[in-house]
Image (cartoon, grey):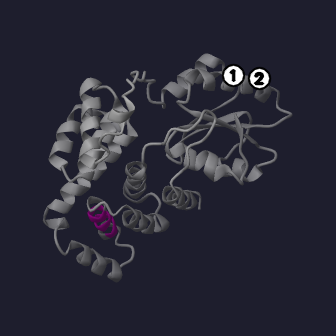
Amino acid sequence: MIDVTIANFEEEVIAASMTTPVLIDFWAPWCGPCKSLGPVLEKVEAAYAGRFKLVKIDSDQEQQLGAAFGIRSIPTCILMVNGQPVDGFTGALPEGQIKDFLDKHLPPAAEEAPQEELPAAEAEADTSPEGVLEKLQYAVATDPANDNARFDYVKQLLTLGRSDDAKVAFAPVIAQTSHVRRFDSLQRWMDAIDFAADSAGGAGAEATFDARIAANKRDFEARFDKARCLMAQQRWTDTLDELLEILMRDKSWNEDLARKTYIAVLDIMEAPKPKVADGQIPPEDPVLATYRRRLSSVVLS
């Protein structure tokens, strides 16, 4: 369990919840029920093996954070997903009820298939885009339930401009877009490609959108359509900048459409984590870190 303060809240809660749900435990040293709840939460966190992250906030020391979440009694637990509170509970619940609460919001645990080690020469044989694509295609063919491999495979197809092949590869999991965020991110990318391919997003569309925005900076439809065209061109930071322009003016515009698309771009931009020694944390891409902080600043403002 990590102690969170106003100084590390953005990194440990907002940014972390973009990839893994974060459960915040608001407590105080004098609170008896808090002392009984803490060990139960730690036990559940260990049992769930990385499906969520547990942090604690001393409500006496961090009154600004307590006020931001409207905490009126402790212990109170708040679940954060994609930088937003989605649910919570008050009081020292038993272990079974805590698990029931988490299971409503967390994706089901998936057993990872053991990966066969390739000989060093074979593993390094072909790192070209097509070579990487071939390996990912093989991974999906041998283990269709491997969501990580399928995400990487569809992403690689889209990166190479093979959108029709990507749609075929994506079809078996299209029904999962409502509860698997990274699949939803791929769907948003494919939708942007389709938009850019039709008359509304064709040649000269960006200049048209720019003219509309110049005339009215709150023309969010024009800004979003421009962002989709940029997304189709894989101009990721330009896309994020345009979406930020919407979010800074209206955080919840069109049922959070700009924020959800922003998060989708972050998912797509993120490269597979490099392997590091046990106990070490893989380095984060500085560009991604910057844009995650910008989103956090807008959401918390």
Task: Say which quarter of the image contains residue 237.
Answer: bottom left
How many C-alpha atoms fall within 10 Å of the one at disc 1: few (<14), some, or many (≥20)? some
How many C-alpha atoms fall within 10 Å of the one at disc 2: few (<14), some, or many (≥20)? some
Could you tell me the amino acid type at mark 2? Answer: Ser
Task: Say which quarter of the image contains residue 46.
Answer: top right
Can residue 187 be spotted in the picture?
no
Relative to 155, residue 136 above or below: above
Q: Residue 276 vs residue 238: left or right?
A: right
Could you tell me the amino acid type at mark 1? Answer: Val
Quarter placement of the C terminus: bottom right
Can residue 236 be spotted in the picture?
yes
- Residue 245 picture location, percent across and down: 43, 69
Q: Residue 78 vs residue 171: left or right?
A: right
- Residue 178 picture location, percent across and down: 34, 37
Q: Nearer the viewer, residue 168 or 258?
A: 168
Residue displayed at 33% across by 82% down? 215
Q: Main secondary structure of the magenta part?
A: helix
Q: Contact, CB < 8 Å: mark 1 with mark 2? A: yes
Residue displayed at 77% across by 43% down? 59
Relative to 187, residue 249 above or below: below
Q: Residue 121 vs residue 102: left or right?
A: left
Task: Say which quarter of the image contains residue 192.
Answer: bottom left
Residue at mark 2: 36
Is 279 in the magenta?
Answer: no
Residue segment shown in magenta = 223-230
Please tell me whether mark 2 sits on a helix, a strand or a loop: helix
Q: Nearer the viewer, residue 219 or 154?
A: 154
Residue at mark 1: 40
Residue displayed at 53% across by 48% down? 83
Q: Nearer the viewer, residue 74 or 107?
A: 107
